[in-house]
Image (spheres, rainbow, N blue to C red):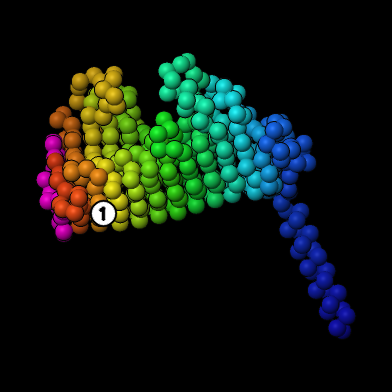
Amino acid sequence: MAKLTFSCAFLFLFFISFFVQSSNAAYNVISFGAKPDGKTEATQAFLKAWQAACNSAIASTIYIPKGRFLLKATVFSGPCKNRITVKIDGTLVAPTDYRALGNSGYWILFIKVDRVAVYGGALDAKGAGFWACRNSGKSCPVGARSITFNWANNIVVSGLTSINSQLTHLVINSCNNVVVQNVKLFAPDLSPNTDGIHVQTSTGVTIKGSTMQTGDDCISIGPGTNNLLMSNIKCGPGHGVSIGSLARELNEAGVQNVTLTDAVFTGSDNGVRIKSWARPSNGFVRNILFQNIVMRNVENPIIIDQNYCPQNQGCPLQSSGVKISEVTYRNIQGTSATAEAVTFDCSPSSPCRGIKLQDIKLTYNNRAATSSCKNIGGTSSGVLVPGSCL
């Protein structure tokens, strides 16, 4: 009886093991010809692995082992037959010559995919050459975003590190149900347009437990963003967490239901910012919550700027049509690097409405900072330093 019980148990475990293994196909990029030396181009090997996974009727995993893999501009396109997990233990590196990525605007692009998860690994876009070109005033390529998801649904990006992107590190465009967690995005503070994460025309995006040290916005939020939750974020250096810039176009989708909670800003050029060009627009920003935030030597910790015009170039000298309403700032404390810590510069033609300040304590050089308000209405409560100008 004991032998029979042992045999049955063995067979049970065997079949369970067989079922688990057979229910998930695995594709190692090495098997498709990729070499982990950082010198041999692996683009075609990665695309072959993707094609095999995309055509698999069962869920599949693409595995990228330790080592450095050289990739040119690469498109992973769907739709695919089942879910795909991309497990990265190595580093994907861009060509040293920044011109090799061309003018497509992307380095790694996932397009029209569903149920794709990217775990671990690192991206090294080697952006310094491109930044130098931009700063020299010479004719340069448009630049590449390191990893982009276009028209994608049910996406997970977890544990990824991205360094020295030419432009934005991670773009989420026209997507639904995306989770970004435990990512680290690094570029020098003077590198141009190296935003950490850009979200636009997307619904149901969560960004949590992540660190951004960049030359532009840590997180930028564009038109058409709905139901965005950001939590446990570390930002700085960089330009803060920004909704906008908006009002680039007259007909522009609005931004709504956005929450940032439990964040720390350190030495950033801004904290929480809403910005729009002073142009006519049908756009709006509403139902926004910024709460439980620590500012450490941050310029402009709280700012709404509806006269946004970098370098004073291309400004139409009009007023912004973007309607900003129902924005709550709650439990925001720390130190400002500028005497004015709270700035509300709203549109005279579309004043801000329903702005709420609750328990704000921001100091400058060990004394209370100041605040200013233009074209704004709202309420304030709790401890307020600086005093409310609402």
Is residue 379 visible to us here? no
State the quadrant of the C terminus.
top left
- When asked about the image quadrant of residue 52, the answer is top right
Given the current orientation, which residue lies at the most extreme bottom position? 1
Q: What amino acid is found at the position of numbered circle 1 in the picture?
A: Gly
Q: Residue at x 54, y 50 (%)?
A: 158
Q: Residue at x 73, y 53 (%)?
A: 23
Disc 1 target residue: 334
Q: Residue at x 51, y 36 (%)?
A: 164
Q: Nearer the viewer, residue 299 or 79?
A: 299
Spot occupied by residue 137 in the image (x, y as percentages of width and height): 42, 18
Spot occupied by residue 112 in the image (x, y as percentages of width and height): 57, 34
Q: Nearer the viewer, residue 369 or 318?
A: 369
The crowding category of the residue bearing disc 1, from other C-alpha atoms within 10 Å (few below 14, some 14 to 19, many at least 20), is some
Magenta-drawn stretch contains 378 = yes
From the image, give the main secondary structure of the stretch colored magenta: strand
Q: Which residues are magenta?
A: 373-389
Magenta-drawn stretch contains 186 = no
Whether residue 59 is situated above or below residue 247 in the rendered picture: below
Q: Residue at x 35, y 56 (%)?
A: 262
Left or right: where does residue 110 sit relative to residue 225?
right
